[in-house]
Image: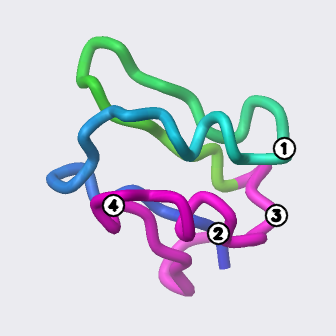
Amino acid sequence: MPAVVIEEKCIGCKQCVFTCPEASTIIFNQEKNIVEINIERCKSCGLCVEVCPTDALVLSLLVG
């Protein structure tokens, strides 16, 4: 159950990037000013979901 980004809600604050314990799982896309999740590296810990101030991250059964 990896984390996924709801792009419309992401404000590019990068709190999830700094919180994720898995290196290179959450990448900041400067062009779009949003984060992107590498679902193959995501361990589904939910830390990114907890710190997101706009609820732009969710754990989803629909991917992975």
How packed is label 1: few (under 14 Cα within 10 Å), some, or many (20 or more)?
Answer: few
Q: Which mark is residue 22?
A: 1
**x, y (%) of residue 57?**
43, 63
Q: Find disc 4 in the rendering and name its residue.
A: 56
Q: Main secondary structure of the magenta part?
A: loop
* Residue at x 28% of width, y 60% of height: 54
| Depicted 17 relative to depicted 59: above or below | above
Q: Are marks 3 and 1 in contact (CB under 8 Å)?
A: yes
How packed is label 4: few (under 14 Cα within 10 Å), some, or many (20 or more)?
Answer: many
**x, y (%) of residue 13?**
38, 34
Distance between the alpha carbons at the discs numbered 1 and 4 = 19 Å
The amino acid beneath tag 2 is Pro
Single out the mark in the foreground, 4 or 2: 4
Q: Which mark is residue 43?
A: 3
Q: Find disc 2 in the rendering and name its residue.
A: 2
Magenta stretch in the rendered image: 40-64
The amino acid beneath tag 1 is Glu
Quarter of the rendering containing residue 38: top right
Distance between the alpha carbons at the discs numbered 2 and 3 = 7 Å
* Residue at x 74% of width, y 56% of height: 42
